[in-house]
Amino acid sequence: MVETSNLNGVMVPILTPLTPEEKLDAPSLRRLINYLLENGVHGLWAAGTTGEFAALPNDQRIQLFDIIVDEVAGRLPIIANISAASTQLTVEFGNAVKKMRLDGVAATPPYYFPCSQMEILEHFRYIRQQVELPLWVYNIPSTVKTVVDPETIAQLAAEGTVVGVKDSSGGGESLAQLNVLLDRNRVPLYRFLGSMYRTAVARDIGAHGIISGISNFVPGIIVDLWNLAESDNQDAIRNLQEKLIVATKVQSLIKTASINGASFAGYKAALAFMGIIDHDTVTRPFRPLTEEEREPIPSILAELGLTE
C-alpha cells in the first residue's frame, strides 16, 4: 500500500490482456503496467469496466490483482473493483482479496436488479463493515441500471463508509450537486471522473482526478493534459486535445460493435500493434478487429508519434 492522503491525477482503468483462449495473459499485463508507469500515471483502477471484469471468473480477477500488486510494488495506489450482482457476493469477493496490498476497493450497486437509494446505502455499509478496506462508490448507471444519487454518496461519505467515488454517470450537474453537499458540511471525499474530454478542466469542477479508458492507449496525452491544466499554456492544451481526438479513432474502427466492444477491441489492437500486449482478444460476445479494420492503426499511431 502507498500513501493516498493526497490522491489525485490520472488513474488508469487498466485493460485485462487475454490469450486467444480468454485466459489472463500475465506477461502482457506486466508490460502494460510498465508502459503506464513509464508515462507517469498516478494510479491504477483494477478490473473495472474497461478491464471487462463482469465477464471474468473470480479466479482470474484475483490473479489479475495479484499480478498488478506484484508489478507495481508499491509505486502507485491500486483501487480494486470487487463489484458483483449482490451485496453478499461482493463481500465474499472482497474478503478473498482483502489481504492483498490494495489501497482500496470499489463497488457498483448490485446489478441486474435495480435498487432503491436506501438499498444502496445498506449495500455500501455492509461491504465496508465486512471487508474493512477503504471503499469507493463506482457510479456507472449505463451498465448497472441504478444511479447512486449525490445525496446518497454524500451521506455515505459523511458517516465514513466511503472515501471516494468514480463518477461515470456522465452528468456534470450530479457532480456539482455532490460538491455542494460535501462542501456545505466539509466532508472529505475523493472525486474522480470517468471522462477524457474533461481532463483539462477536472480540477475546476471539483474533481481530484480522471479515470479514463483511453489512458491505457495514450497515457502520456492524458497525463500531460492533467499536468498542464493549471498552466496558462492554452496552445499546448489545445494541441494535446487535438491529439486526443486522433486517439479516439481507435474506438470506432468496428462499425458493427457496441460502444464498449469497439473501444476495448480498438485499444487492445493498438497496444498489440505497439508490441505492448501480445493479443487483442476481448471477452465474447465482443470480438477483435478484422485485418481490414486494423488497417488504419499504423497511420493513427504515426499521427500520434507513437511509432519508431
Image: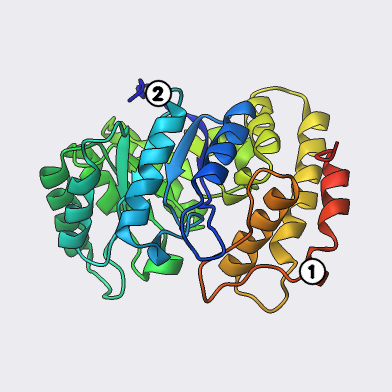
Q: Which class describes the residues within 10 Å of circle 1: few (<14), some (14-19), or many (20+)? A: few
Provide residue 203's location: percent of width, then percent of height.
54, 33
Name the colouring of the figure: rainbow
Q: For the residues marked 1 and 2, what is the alpha-carbon distance in whole angstroms?
A: 39 Å
Amino acid identity at mark 2 = Gly
Provide residue 35's location: percent of width, then percent of height.
62, 34
Which quarter of the image is occupied by the C terminus?
A: top right
150, above or below 76, in the image: below
**For residue 267, which quarter of the picture?**
bottom right
Residue placed under numbered mark 2 in the picture: 74
> For numbered disc 2, what is the local secondary structure?
loop
> For numbered disc 1, what is the local secondary structure?
helix
Which quarter of the image is occupied by the N terminus?
A: top left
Residue 64 in view: yes
Provide residue 189's location: percent of width, then percent of height.
33, 35
Provide residue 163's location: percent of width, then percent of height.
29, 37
Amino acid identity at mark 1 = Glu
Q: Residue at point 32% right, 47% down?
A: 106
